[in-house]
Image (spheres, rainbow, N blue to C red):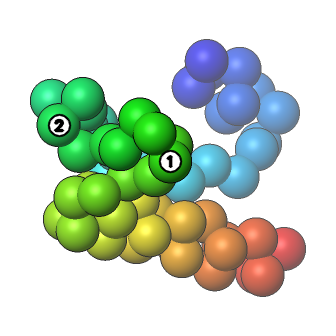
Amino acid sequence: MRQILVFFNAKVLNKTEVMISQLASKVDVESNTITDLATIEVIGAQLRALAGMAREY
């Protein structure tokens, strides 16, 4: 995938991947919401980085 994106000179978010271990213990299946604060912060940071990159272009 990266080679294809490089070929097209695409802008990508190269920083941290978000990988959530033990997801079942971090999500409330009744309300479909994330309950683990650390997980919320990691996902939020990634989304803020993506929004910042989108604003540049």
Q: Residue type at mark 1?
A: Ser
Residue 22 located left or right of residue 3: left
Q: Label for residue 25?
A: 2
Q: Residues within 10 Å of mark 1 (few under 14, many from 20)?
A: few
Numbered disc 2: secondary structure = helix
> Taking 32 as reference, is 47 above or below it?
below
Residue 28 located left or right of residue 20: right
Please report the residue visible at 67 percent of the width from the left and 74 percent of the height from the top: 51
Please report the residue visible at 78 percent of the width from the left and 81 percent of the height from the top: 55
Q: Residue type at mark 2?
A: Ser
From the top left corner, tell me how far across and down residue 41 is, in percent. 31, 71
In the rendered view of the protein, which quadrant contains the N terminus? top right
Please report the residue visible at 41 percent of the width from the left and 59 percent of the height from the top: 43
> Taking 10 as reference, is 54 above or below it?
below
Q: Which of 39 and 52 is in front in this view?
A: 39
- Residue 37 lies in quadrant: bottom left
Q: Name the residue under label 1.
A: 31
Disc 2 to disc 1, C-alpha distance: 14 Å
Numbered disc 1: secondary structure = loop
Q: Which of 29 and 43 is in front in this view?
A: 29
Please report the residue visible at 44 percent of the width from the left and 70 percent of the height from the top: 44
